[in-house]
Image (cartoon, grey):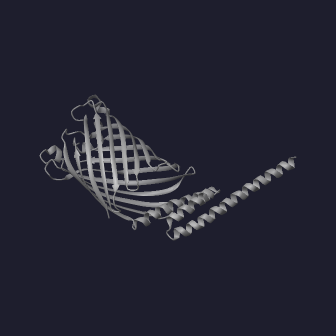
Amino acid sequence: MKFFLIFILANLLLGSLSFAQDSDTLANAFKEQADSYAESELYDEAIGQYQQAADAAFNQELKHKIMLSIEHAKLKKIELNKEHNWDFTFGQSAFYDSNVLRQGPESQQTGTQKASPGTVTNLYQSYAKSFSKIHALQQQLGLIYNRYTDRAHSNIYSNDSLQGSFSFSYLWLHLFMRTKAQARYEVFADYSLQDYEGKNTLRYFSKDYGINLIESIQTSQSHDLIFAVRIQKYDNENRENGLTTITPSLSSSLKTSSGNTIYQSLESQFITGEVSTNDSRVYQYQISYIRYLGDNLSITPYLQFQLQDTKEQKDTRGTESNYLGGLSSSYKFSKKWSFDSSLVHRRRYSKEKTLYTYYQTLLQLGASYEF
């Protein structure tokens, strides 16, 4: 009897080993075919074959290599479709602002209680390049010019601004506890000119710079969990307005069965001022729903809620709350041209009624061209 049990167990083990070997042999066959497609730049076919290889693979190390090959093929497909690694986009839009906010960090913004239309002109440049199956670099430059149409009130046109931005990112595809993940390490900087003296002259107003550390984990085929930390230094022409902000966040991106996306995020901003009266803590929740109506049109409703602990200013400002709701849309009516629109309503409540309690409605319409 004992010998019989040993015989059965041995056959089961040999059968399992045989199954594993057969599965990996099949996976390698799919992978070889996928490699051939990838070398011929047939990335859709390659991705399909790689996926079949991953499904068949029994060996975890082999499965990991195949999953990295899938991500590499996806990056190469994007590069091939772009025909080049460089992107340039020019955009022009017009807006109506029901309550122009004085420029500065959001935690320090105050309302003018005056409305004005205006225009926004922007130019973006980006570059992306993958260097292997798991490494890639991205770089972006941006230039944005905001101009208010109201030239009669200096507290309106003093918010005219020209802002330049730069970012550089390194991306690393890897496994996190046997789950597909992507890390992004980013440095960024912004430099802003503004007519803050109301003399129709743009002068240095502020700069900020810092790093983003982001880890995105694919918990399922339709869900990503994103951990991030942002460390930012803000300098102002008035040194006392300088801030250092550390922002940890947790986000979730869920793709529905219909192909739409639900995005949620929680974050805490730990703000330390050059002077202690500007210290504060901000707690924020945001949710958005990206709905695709065909291949060229998307509509995104979103909500945001903030609580701000004003620390040393609590006697005058209390604990402030900020509510924001909006709807944006994007329609790509050709390979190069797209039309964008947005409607945003913001309501801020503060113990201090004159400056920090306000509401704002902002309507913006624009078009952009991708070179």
**Is 332 placed above or below 196 here?**
below
Residue 222: percent from left, percent from top: 50, 49
Foreground residue, 104 or 357?
357
**Of residues 352 and 363, the one drawn nearer to the viewer in this rendering:** 363
Quarter holding the C terminus is: bottom left
Camera-side residue: 269 or 72?
Answer: 72
Location of residue 33 in the rendering, given as x and y in whole percent from the top left corner: 58, 67
- Residue 203 location in percent, x, y? 19, 52
Q: Give the farthest residue toward the right.
A: 1
Q: Residue furthest top?
A: 315
User: Can residue 229 be seen here?
Assistant: yes
Q: In the image, what residue occupies the spot 86% across and 47% down?
A: 2
Specify the quadrant of the image occupied by residue 339: bottom left
Determine the residue positioned at 61% across, 59% down: 62
As drawn, is 197 to the left or to the right of 262? left
The tally of labels here is 0
**Residue projecting furthest to the front:** 294
Q: Is residue 159 visible?
A: no
Instruction: Return the residue nearer the eye: 337 or 173.
Output: 337
- At which x and y percent is residue 47? 53, 62
| Residue displayed at 25% across by 37% down | 359
Query: Is residue 229 found left or right of 363 in the rendered image?
Result: right
Furthest-left residue in this view: 152
